[in-house]
Image (cartoon, rainbow, N blue to C red):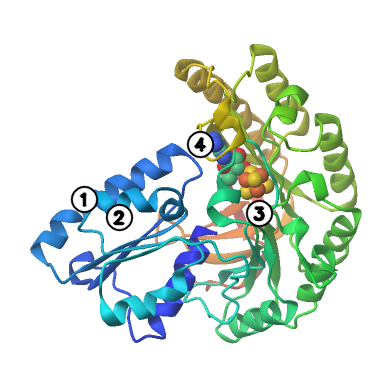
Amino acid sequence: MNKYDSELVSGLLNSDGFEMTDDIEKADVILVNTCSVREHAENRALSNISQLQSLKRRKPELILGVLGCMSRHLGDKIFEDNTYVDLVLGPDSYRKLPEFLKNRKRYKNVEYKEYETYTDIFPLRKDGVTAYVAISRGCNEECSYCIVPFTRGKERSRSIESIIDEIEKLLDEGFKEITLLGQNVNSYNYQGTDFPKLLKRVSEIENLKRIRFATSHPMNLSDGLIDVMAERENVCPYLHLPVQSGSNRILEAMKRNYTVEKYIGLVEKSMSKIKDLSLTTDIISGFPGETEDDHRATIELVKKVEFDSAFTFKYSPRDKTEAFGLKDDVSEDVKISRLAEISEIIREVSLKKNREWIGKVTDIMIEGKSRRSDSEVFGRTGGFKKVVLKQNNLSAGTIVPVIIKDATSQTLFGELVG
Ligand code: 5AD
Ligand code: SF4
């Protein structure tokens, strides 16, 4: 979502006559887009911002701005403490950018605007074949550890027409794959149209080769969605379904509104209906009160579900959240060792899942040259697995059948079929 917001802001600047540069020394305006989801992300952003101070000293006319969730969370302090920061804008205030650039007076706006969806602004993407399209902003859930409902506010869904329109423009520009974005896509609702209906409508757009979406909250993953995924060929068999913990006690404290049993039931149903479904997840380790038994329950869940891959995080206390009132009582050492153990099990199950592909034929869409070598390209399967091919004459966006010959926990290696 942050990447999409950066593209949105680039679109705004672009229509105001600004161009992007890769050379920071040449920039007239530097905007740092920020995330607040964990303290580590904020600390990194703060250190990036302070490093830009020397650039600003050498070039006083340089405009330095801070955007995004951290502006909403810490914007007042950042603006007061750092006089070299010219601009602070929260996630609902990007429209103020052109006005600020006209009069260039130090400015801060971190207001929450309940209806802002930026529907009329066309984001400026980097060249490529895959693009993000936001379908909603904000979040109505109240997960007790999460700062997003505070920084991004209540959920608002974009109109179906504006989503379709943006995708059609992207196809005209040569994009082939779209990822629909929302903090919780499953609660999309625009004048009675829910997410499965939207997804089906999007899948009917001519020439749209591949559709993905993120993120799905397990609580409202409906049969209707599973059916659309199973039926529509251009909807990729890929589900990012954050589980967060394998312990019912912790899930309740996290206010996730499902149990481990319900989660496993959803996974089994989805797997049985959607061919070759890949499943990924998010896991938080060391939530307040997490015992060794809770941790073991998470390990057991990972082993049972066999996720294709997972993002794992140490619990980070965030003010403005309910869990901030709980004692952060799992020590740093224990959080680190639990996380390491979970990551190792995930590596093992990912390797097992990837090796199951050896000998099978599947379509991949080429995304570009491989990082390792110019004589190789890489693409992705419908399940979002990266496949490296010894081939250099295939251009990005081409869909080709490959046979998988080898696999690591991260990458598949294939050969063209035919
Ligand atoms: N600490 C650690 N991880 C968090 N996440 C959200 N809030 C926190 C927090 N306070 C993780 C969740 C979520 C992902 C985007 O970030 O796993 O799914
Ligand atoms: Fe945060 Fe929960 Fe909303 Fe995800 S669903 S953004 S974890 S509050």
Label 1 and label 2: CA atoms lie apart by 16 Å
Q: Residue 322: horizontal and vertical position, in percent?
A: 61, 34
Label 2 and label 3: CA atoms lie apart by 26 Å
User: Which quadrant of the rendered structure holds the C terminus?
Assistant: bottom right
Q: Which residue is mark 1?
A: 51
Amino acid type at mark 3:
Cys
| Discs 2/3, front | 2
Give the mark, 1 or 4, whose residue is nearer the N terminus: 1
Give the mark, 4 or 3, whose residue is nearer the N terminus: 3
Q: Residue 12: horizontal and vertical position, in percent?
A: 44, 79
In this view, the residue in front, 386 or 289, is 289
In this view, the residue in front, 154 or 62, is 154
Q: Which residue is mark 3?
A: 139
Label 1 and label 3: CA atoms lie apart by 32 Å
How packed is label 2: few (under 14 Cα within 10 Å), some, or many (20 or more)?
Answer: many
Q: Are marks 1 and 2 in contact (CB under 8 Å)?
A: no
Q: Residue at x 55, y 44 (%)?
A: 147
SS at circle 1 = helix
SS at circle 2 = helix
Amino acid type at mark 2:
Phe
Q: Which residue is mark 2?
A: 79
Which image quarter has ligand 1? top right
Give the mark, 4 or 2, whose residue is nearer the N terminus: 2
| Discs 1/4, front | 4
Q: Residue 130: horizontal and vertical position, in percent?
A: 57, 69
| Discs 4/2, front | 2
Amino acid type at mark 4:
Arg
Give the mark, 1 or 3, whose residue is nearer the N terminus: 1
| Discs 1/2, front | 2
Q: Residue 204: horizontal and vertical position, in percent?
A: 80, 78
How packed is label 4: few (under 14 Cα within 10 Å), some, or many (20 or more)?
Answer: some
Residue 318's tag is 4
